[in-house]
Amino acid sequence: MVSNKGRLDCNILVRTVDDVLFAKSYMETIGCTARIMAKLEKSEGIENLNEILGEVDAVMVARGDLGVEIPMERVPMYKKRS
């Protein structure tokens, strides 16, 4: 079970693999070994999913946030792609 603080520590908003690599570099600098869950809120994150998956431990698709950026009827399609 992950505490609320733990969830905040490992849940990062991701658009590209560079976002993940930056977070991993920072985590290494501070000695953090937490797993990384990428939170995809933008269509750019879905488009870069394959590269992102190679660097994270888990992915969460934020349907509500994604629905603000793309037409709501397309959200299930984007989520299915993830």
Image (spheres, rainbow, N blue to C red):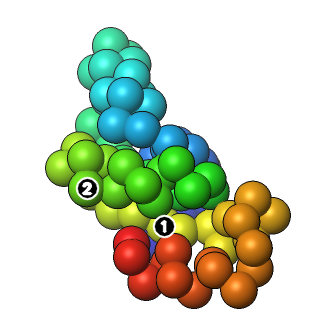
Label of residue 60 in the image: 1
The Cα atoms of the two marked residues, 1 and 2, are separated by 14 Å
Looking at the rendered image, the disc whose residue lies closer to the viewer, 1 or 2, is 2
Residue drawn 42% across the image and 38% down it: 16
Q: Quadrant of the C terminus?
A: bottom left
Which residue is tagged 2? 50
Q: Kindly identify the residue that appears in the image at 57 percent across and 86 percent down.
A: 76
Residue type at tag 1 = Met
Amino acid type shown at disc 2: Asn
* Front-lying residue, 80 or 39: 80
- Mark 1, Cα crowd under 10 Å, few <14 / some 14-19 / many 20+, is some
Q: Is residue 61 above or below residue 26?
A: below
Q: Is residue 67 above or below residue 4?
A: below
- Secondary element at image label 2: helix
- Image position, residue 1 (x, y; %): 43, 72
N-terminal label among 1 and 2: 2
Left or right of 80 on screen, residue 49: left
Q: Nearer the viewer, residue 36 or 59?
A: 59
Numbered disc 1: secondary structure: strand
Residue 46: image location, x then y, percent: 46, 59
Nearest the camera: 67 or 20? 67
Q: Nearer the viewer, residue 18 or 22?
A: 18
